[in-house]
Image (cartoon, grey):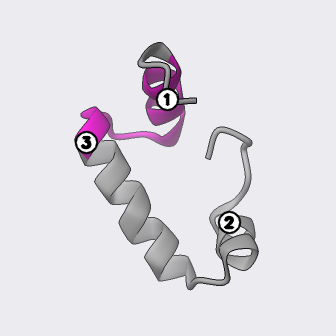
Amino acid sequence: MAQAMSVEDIANDLFISVNTVKTHQRGIYRKLRVSRRNDAVRRARQLGLV
């Protein structure tokens, strides 16, 4: 996500489905308490996760 890859590109790189990527994204958003991708990346950087 932090590399600005599309959901499709992430799925292809990890050999998983697009729906699986979206499910994991929702979990990340929930844990970081954000609702958008750029907010998740920003928050992860603030927390030193990226």
The residue sitting at the top extreme is 46
Residue 7 position (above or below residue 15): above
The residue indicated by pointer 2 is 10
For label 1, the residue is: 49
Region of the chain picked out in magenta, as a range: 31-45
Asked if disc 3 and disc 2 are in contact, CB closer than 8 Å, the reply is no
What residue is at 56 percent from the left and 79 percent from the top?
A: 18
Question: How many C-alpha atoms fall within 10 Å of the one at disc 2: few (<14), some, or many (≥20)?
Answer: some
Crowding around mark 1 (Cα neighbors within 10 Å: few <14, some 14 to 19, many 20+) is few
Mark toward the start of the polypeptide (2 vs 1): 2
Q: Residue at x 50, y 70 (%)?
A: 21
Along the horizontal axis of the image, is 4 left or right of 34?
Answer: right
Q: What residue type is disc 2 on?
A: Ile
Which-is-in-front pick, marks 2 and 1? 1
Q: Could you tell whether 5 is left or right of 49 in the image?
A: right
Query: Disc 1 on helix, strand or loop?
Result: loop
Please tell me whether residue 42 belongs to the stretch shown in magenta. yes
- Which quadrant of the figure has residue 4? top right
Report the predominant secondary structure element of the magenta stretch. Answer: helix
Horizontal side of residue 42 vs 24, given as left or right: right
- How far apart, in angstroms, are the residues tagged by discs 3 and 1? 12 Å
Q: Is residue 48 magenta?
A: no
**Disc 3 to disc 2, C-alpha distance:** 20 Å
Q: Secondary structure at mark 2?
A: helix
Q: CA distance from mark 2 to mark 1?
A: 18 Å
Residue topped by disc 3: 31
Amino acid type shown at disc 1: Leu
Q: Amino acid at mark 3?
A: Lys
Work out whether 44 lies above or below 29. above
